[in-house]
Image: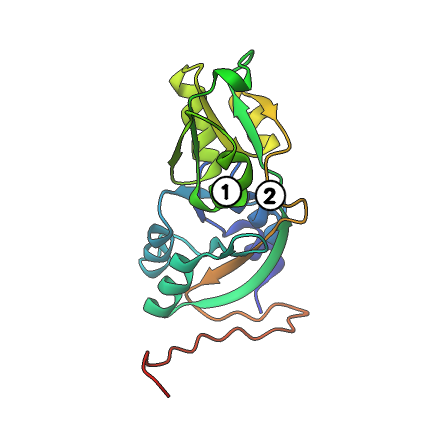
Amino acid sequence: MVPEDRAATAVRGLKGEPGAYSEQAALDFFGGSVRAAGLEQFEDCFLALREGRADYAVLPIENSSNGSVRAVYQLLQEHDLSVVRSTRLCIRHELLALPGVKQEEITEIYSHEQAIGQCSRFLGGLKDVKVIPCGNTAAAAKMVAESGNPHAAAISSHPCAALYGLECVNGHIQDSDNNYTRFICVTKDPIIYAGANKISLIIALNNKPG
């Protein structure tokens, strides 16, 4: 068990910039007193835990529309860490751009690979638009805001529009309205929270017939 005050203030490892869905998941886990540091890569979060630079890491692991986040599964196999909590967030992607920009003016769209996959039908219907993967949806919004480029847009969340001074160009771009991502909270030492009723296991098998 961990005292609630410690659990509410010890989070420091997140994948993404402020406004990222991982930050929303951390708030769901620990409430409004989260202290978080955004990290660029999933592996950075695991290394921060191993090296004692973070107490917890909050990471996406599975999406209802686009499947598993394979990089996180792989890292869980490589690092001796424990999954201690999980939560599901309803994901609502929007196409964000600088104020006054219209969709027909956009020639490049930035976002995380998972978000790109979750909006594949919309993106497949665009012509002469380059889709560019980046670290996470919040980083995409920040990049577009800082670039000043009226032809750039980001697939990101509505809170990121307000956070980075962007406007929603199109709020109906994801393949499914029933779009949920499961996030996990990972830590170096096993912790059992009050009301815990799940066990998570990773089992690796040899890749051979039989």
Q: Earlier in the sequence, mark 1 or mark 2?
A: 1
Q: How many numbered badges does the structure rendering display?
A: 2
Q: Quadrant of residue 130?
A: top left
On-image quarter of the N terminus: bottom right
Q: How far across and how far down the image is residue 20, in percent?
A: 51, 39
Is residue 18 among what the camera can see? no
Q: To which residue does mark 2 refer?
A: 175
Q: To which residue does mark 1 refer?
A: 115
- The amino acid on which the numbered mark 1 sits, given as a three-letter code, is Ala
Q: Which mark is residue 133?
A: none
Depth check, front residue: 5 or 191? 191
Is residue 90 among what the camera can see? yes
Label 1: state its secondary structure.
Answer: helix
Q: Quadrant of residue 150?
A: top left
Depth check, front residue: 103 or 143? 103
Q: Residue furthest bottom?
A: 210
Q: How far across and how far down the image is residue 93, in percent?
A: 58, 37
How dense is the environment of label 2, judged by Cα within 10 Å: few (below 14), some, or many (20 and up)? some
Instruction: Residue at 41%, 20% (x, y): give it.
Output: 146
Instruction: Residue at 36%, 64% (x, y): give it.
Output: 74
Q: Is residue 89 left or right of residue 101?
A: right
Instruction: Residue at 60%, 46% (x, y): give it.
Output: 27
Q: How far separated are the C-alphas under marks 1 and 2? A: 10 Å
Q: Is residue 171 left or right of residue 83?
A: right
